[in-house]
Image (spheres, coloured by chain):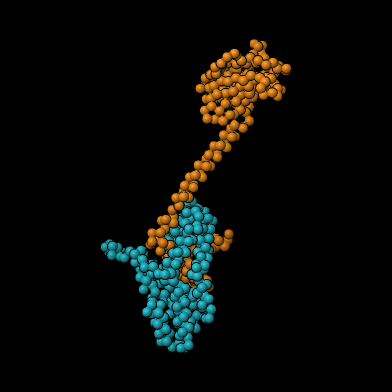
Amino acid sequence: MEVEAASAEEIDLIARYLAGRLSETESTRLEARVAAEPGLYERVEEVLRLQEGLAVLAQRDDLDALLREPPWRKRLGIWAAAAALALAVIGLGAWWASREPPAGVLALSVADLHMGARAPTIEGPYVFARTRGEASVLEIPRLNVRSAIELKFVPSVSSAGGRYRLTVQSSGAGGGGRALVGTLDSAAFGPDGYVTVFLDSAALRSGRYDLALEPSGSARADEGDRFEFRVP
Amino acid sequence: MTETENILTRDSRDAMDDGAPSRHIGDQAQLSRELFANMAGLRLKLARVTRNPDLAADILQDAIVTALQKLNAGELSARTALDGFVYRVALNHLRNHQRKDKSPLSDQNAAAELADPRTHCMTESLQSAQWARVTRELLMEVKPVRDRELLVRFYLHEESKQELCEMFGLSDLHFNRVIFRARERFRELLSRRGLGRADFLSILAVF
């Protein structure tokens, strides 16, 4: 590093001399050094030869081409940037899909949603029950104000412990991946005969959502109810 | 007769006029030729500054003759001192010409009459062409392209280190590295092409 710096300083001194930018004293001192220091004039000569080489290239109009990035390299740069961006998007998508559900998206009460000091607006209730025939998809409007959405379920399967696990997933509509929105493992029948859960509206975007209500502790994936809603 | 032969003839005549022993004439002629060849970079720089290749050759030759006279008179003792002395004298000429070149023009019309230095030195010598080839090779190896531009602006356009560091947003360290490595590589390439200084020195070992 020190050799580099000392050599570069010397080259700079020589270049300034050759450009006529040294003072009279400095010039005289350098000329005296050249006469006294074996090898210094060779280094001056090298600078001069490099200058001459560049001057010839400039005369031939060859320098411009040498100072331009080759087109293929430019294209490569653009492709590399595009590939990096694509990888970043894919990575972000994968992270989004696999991330832990945000705490407090689903709760048994409005208070458990931790939506701030002010009492939140309650939207709903929306009732989900298995019915015969073709069921239409329930629509929950997109809310301008953050609210607690009240979801009420009528389970078709009884749970031994009286507890149910609710899982909410976005179903990939609108170009996004399938992602877990939230899960709650201790939902139970309330005095009104429904299993009631509150959902933070801030967790919802436009798209379709799948709800799975299963008895807590059940290992069977097909045991339980599947519902669906969408947000326009 | 070539330019070098002309110079050698004159040099030999000068040496004889000075009463140097005849057995030295051949040696001194060869030494003169080697010095002239080794300082080709300086000669071509002088040619660009004076816009006159013949004048540049004369300046360098005069410096060589003066140095040889000093060597004969015992004022210069070592071979290395001879190199340095010639270079010092020639550089001094270069500085004087640069100083003159920068003096303001008294006649505004004179600027139009001045020869364009680029066209005046258009005739490439074989050496210039060889150095240009090596320089091109060097530039093509330098990455990124910004560092090539740095070299061109520093060496050819003679922009200062400080200006360039500010313009390119470079640290001293980065600048030094680019300049140093380019010089080292240039030296290596010259040597590999048989254009390095060592190639001449091996001939001079007899002195």
- Residue at 53% in and 78% down: B205
The correct choice, above or below, for B73 with respect to B186 in the image is below
Look at chain A in the picture and name its colour. Answer: orange
Looking at the picture, tell me which residue is in the foreground, A90 or B149: A90
Q: Quadrant of residue A211?
A: top right
Q: What is the residue that sits farthest to the right in this orientation?
A: A160
Is A183 on the left or on the right of B111, as rendered? right
The correct choice, above or below, for B199 with respect to A135 in the image is below
- Residue at 43% in and 69% down: B127
| Image location (x, y in percent) of residue A9 | 51, 62
Looking at the picture, tell me which residue is in the foreground, B107 or A172: A172
Looking at the picture, tell me which residue is in the foreground, B162 or A216: A216
In the picture, one chain is cyan; tell me its letter.
B
Report the number of numbered marks. 0
| Image location (x, y in percent) of residue A116 | 59, 23
- Residue at 39% in and 82% down: B10
Residue A158 seen by the camera: yes
| Image location (x, y in percent) of residue A101 | 62, 28
Quadrant location, the N terminus of chain A: bottom right
